[in-house]
Structures are given as C-alpha cells and as structure tokens.
C-alpha cells in the first residue's frame, strides 16, 4: 500500500477532499437559509404572497438581544406595506404611478425603509444621539462658522417657507444633521426638519435655500412625535420626502432632459 492510503481504494487526500466538499456544501446551505431570515414572505407582481424560498426553506426563530434593552426575533411577522399607487398600464410589470402627494408615496426617490420607530441612541449611556442644540447644551456653533439660526428658508421657487428655529446635532459625530424650520402661518406654523446635506446656506443675504422642493411643499413635510428627538423611522421618512422632491416636486422634473 502507498503512504497515506487507508485502503486500496481510499487514501487521506481523498478523505480530506470529500470532507471539505461536505463542509462547503453545508456552509452554502446554511448561508442560503440564513438569507431567508428577513424579508419573507415574498409578494409577486400580482400582489399575491409566495413562499418560494428554495430547498433551504425558512430558518427557525432566533432571538436577538438589543444593546440598550429589549429583544427582536427573526423571522417575524411584519405587516405588508401598502403603497399608494396604481398600474400605469394593464400589462404585467407595468410602472406604478403614485396616487396623491408623490413626496409621501414611498416610491422611487421618495422610498424609505420601515425602520424601528425609536431614536438612535449613544452606546455609552443610551441617550438619544441626534438632538437640537436646546437639548445638547454642551455643544455650540464656533464663532468662525455661520450660524443659520434666524435665517430665512426658501424653496426652489424662492417662496418663503419659514425661518431656522434650531440646529439638530449628532452628539456622537459632533456634526450638524438637521435644521429645524418654523414654517410661516400660511403653511401651518409647524416645526419640520431638513437634512443639512440638502440645504444651501447663503451667507450674503442670510438665506437658506432648499432646491429639492418648493416653498409650499414644506407644509406636508414629515413631523416629529417628540419635539426634542427624532426616531430612525422618522429620519428615513424625512430624507425620503426631500429626496423625492428631486423628481416629484414639479411636473417638469419628471420629464426627460432631452
């Protein structure tokens, strides 16, 4: 018998190869099964639920402990999200047309994820991470930087929407996340947030311009349940509203460039 042979037909190299193949096959099966832990059941183009999960199926329930208390399980039942839209044509896979206010439709650039309706918290003490400066009293705007508070906010059409009432900061990253806008009486005299990345602070005339939406469209911007904190779900909805304005703010933006 040759060195390393177990029998005349099997040797150590063959056994190692078969063992590796079985391990790799089990790993692929495990990963495919774990990929079905969230996002199921699926829905086909006709809106019918389908459990086509392949040979791996759906894994058994697993409990995940959250860092600041509480727990979640996966897989878990999640209510189906209803999108206000209708088919633009009768054939399969026809594009959907949003119904009503397109900025709130949750479609296209206005889409958002169904995140947890709780604020993002700091790892150290579990306190809300993104808060206005009236809460984060240990932070301030440097003297050499522009303080936008009190500035006039206008939309893409230069219509006045309100004034900047406060600044929302990320206490973990020490950066500005949102500007809090007090809208004019014609728009309901309410407080709404605008992502800092979506505004143009114009120092010359103390104006803050938001090119993504029109001035009147601030009236329907998503609000907050708590005036001093923003939840993960509210953050997604806020960003989606202004992001959707890039396409839906005016009919002309939905037309081809050429």
Image: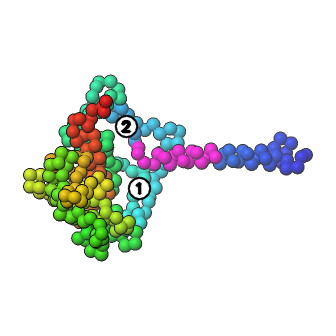
Q: In the current view of this chain or complex, which residue is farthest to the left?
A: 185
Q: CA distance from mark 1 to mark 2?
A: 21 Å
Residue at image point 27% right, 28% down: 88
Is 117 part of what is drawn in magenta?
Answer: no
Q: In the current view of this chain or complex, which residue is farthest to the front?
A: 204
Q: Nearer the viewer, residue 73 or 113?
A: 113
Q: Which residues are magenta?
A: 24-40
Q: Which residue is mark 1?
A: 73
Report whether 126 appears left or right of 97.
right
Foreground mark, 1 or 2, reads 2
Among the 4 quarters of the image, the one containing residue 244: top left
Dominant SS of magenta comes to: helix
- On-image quarter of the C terminus: top left
Is 33 part of what is drawn in magenta?
Answer: yes
Report whether 17 appears left or right of 27.
right
Callout 1 secondary element:
strand
Residue 90 x/y as whole percent: 29, 24
Callout 2 secondary element:
strand
Q: Which residue is mark 2?
A: 43
Instruction: Establish if 96 lies above or below 194.
Output: above
The coloring applied to the image is: rainbow
């Amino acid at each position: 018998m040759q060195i390393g042979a177990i029998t005349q037909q099997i040797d150590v190299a063959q056994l190692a190869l078969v063992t590796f193949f079985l391990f790799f096959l089990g790993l692929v099966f495990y990963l495919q099964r774990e990929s079905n832990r969230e996002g199921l059941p699926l829905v086909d183009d006709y809106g019918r639920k389908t459990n086509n999960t392949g040979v791996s199926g759906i894994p058994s329930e697993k409990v995940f402990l959250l860092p600041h208390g509480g727990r979640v399980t996966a897989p878990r039942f999640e209510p189906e999200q209803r999108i206000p839209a209708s088919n633009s044509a009768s054939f399969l896979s026809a594009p959907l047309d949003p119904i009503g206010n397109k900025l709130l439709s949750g479609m296209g650039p206005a889409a958002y994820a169904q995140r947890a309706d709780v604020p993002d918290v700091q790892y150290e003490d579990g306190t809300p991470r993104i808060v206005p400066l009236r809460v984060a009293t240990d932070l301030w705007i440097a003297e050499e930087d522009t303080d936008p508070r009190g500035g006039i906010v206008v939309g893409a059409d230069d219509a006045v929407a309100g004034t900047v009432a406060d600044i929302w900061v990320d206490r973990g990253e020490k950066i500005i996340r949102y500007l809090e806008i007090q809208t004019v009486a014609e728009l309901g005299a309410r407080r709404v947030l605008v992502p800092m990345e979506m505004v143009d602070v114009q120092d010359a005339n103390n104006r803050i311009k938001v090119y993504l939406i029109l001035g009147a469209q601030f009236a329907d911007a998503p609000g907050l349940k708590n005036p001093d904190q923003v939840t993960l779900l509210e953050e997604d909805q806020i960003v989606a509203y202004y992001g959707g304005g890039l396409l839906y703010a005016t009919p002309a933006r939905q037309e081809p460039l050429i």
